Image: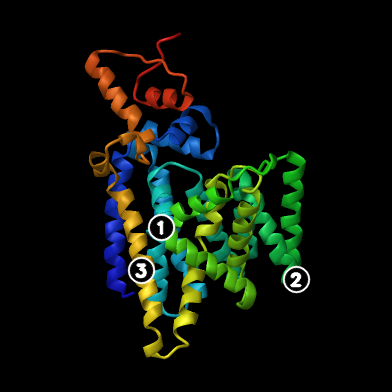
Amino acid sequence: MKQHYFWFLLFIYIVVVSYLASTLPISPHEAKMLYASHDVTASLMQWGEQHIGGFFGLRLFSFLFGFLSIGLFYQVSRLYLKKEEDIFLATTIFMWLPGLLTAAIQANSAILVIVLVLFFILVYEKGYFVLSLPLMLGLFFVHEASIIFFIALLIYGVVHKDKKLAIITASFLITFVYLAKGISIGGRPSGHFAEIFGLYATVFSPLVFLYFFYAMYRILLREEKTLLWYISFTALVFSLLLSIRQRVYITDFGPYVMIAVVLMIEVFNKSIRVRLPQFQRKYRWGFYTVIAVLIFNTLLIVFHKPIFALMDDPKKHFAYRIYKPYWLMQELRQKGQSCFDTHDERLRYQLRYYGVPSCQK
């Protein structure tokens, strides 16, 4: 990808993310975090609401961390890709992934995790081990599911005989066990295995995830296994294994998996550039097909609101739970009603944000 194409697409990205972050109503997850959580994400949301206000203020930190993640991903890509056009291509695909786009326009902890992990990989690979320690500590406190991250680092440290990394990550894992933190494991086989594939297909777009899955498997069999691969592959495998017995939340694993898009580009380049031009055609058409599907899925997010008018039943729209309380608030104000009762906890939080309390005291 040429540099001027990248800057043009980045400009479009800024416009799109700014618009969506400013106009998208508060989601059920955001509303619950705002009023019922006391973690870092909730504190940042509350600060933004108090000092800036509106939907954009609520999501200011996600908006900023979204751009920071793009810059860090660009720098990480330079560690794995040699050609500048490949780095621009990998960064463009990363920033337009539906999962990252959603993380940048809705307040959540995933975008903060992505920034911390990318920053860790960058400083570790450059040899600044001391700087990686506060980043590991930050992940430990910010994300309970970061136990997967530390397991990956422990495996990497043992395999590559990095004693310092292995000892420190083992200490973090012992602390996880002692404090009973981390991902809860339980249940019985319940058929969520196919569901997690659907979630990853939503985060990446279907064909991108299929090629990503192939790339991770190919690296497992024959390519060099880097720190980035260990983190992403460990998270992917654990999510698939846990989905056999219980429901898996994509926010626990997605941040560690999405960052490995650069490895997918690396594998693709190795596949196509060893062949003569006349034998590259099918690979190029496959690439164009994958990108076309990615663009289609991204456009569904960008233009999600007009899709409501095209649907017979708006309740089937993927954003209905976000817009329903907003429309209900407008309807109540038109009727002159100042309160509303519901058994749905998250709906109550959303209405509370719009200034519509419960009628029951």
Is 216 situated above or below 343? Answer: below
Name the residue rendered at 52%, 70% in the picture: 263
Alpha carbon separation for disc pair 2 and 1: 34 Å
Residue neighbourhood size for the residue with mark 3, other residues' Cα within 10 Å, grouped as few (<14), some (14–19), many (≥20): some
Of residues 195 and 125, the one nearer the viewer is 195
Quadrant where the image shows the N terminus: bottom left
Which percent across, then down, holds residue 175?
74, 46
Which disc is residue 107 wearing? none
Q: Please name the amino acid that badge 2 sits on.
A: Lys
Is 210 situated above or below 28? Answer: below
The color scheme shown is rainbow
Res. 141 image quadrant: top right
Is 126 situated above or below 252? Answer: below
Q: Please name the amino acid that badge 1 sits on.
A: Leu
Which percent across, then down, holds residue 4?
27, 71
Name the residue rendered at 55%, 36% in the picture: 39
Residue neighbourhood size for the residue with mark 1, other residues' Cα within 10 Å, grouped as few (<14), some (14–19), many (≥20): many
Label 1's element?
loop
User: Which of the two marks, 3 or 2, is nearer to us in this view?
Assistant: 3
The residue under label 2 is 161
Label 3's element?
helix
Res. 52 in view: no
Of residues 101 and 271, the one nearer the viewer is 271
Residue neighbourhood size for the residue with mark 2, other residues' Cα within 10 Å, grouped as few (<14), some (14–19), many (≥20): few
The residue under label 3 is 289
Alpha carbon separation for disc pair 3 and 2: 41 Å
Name the residue rendered at 23%, 39% in the picture: 309
Task: Report the number of numbered marks.
Answer: 3
The residue under label 1 is 97
Which tag, 2 or 1, sits closer to the chain's start?
Answer: 1
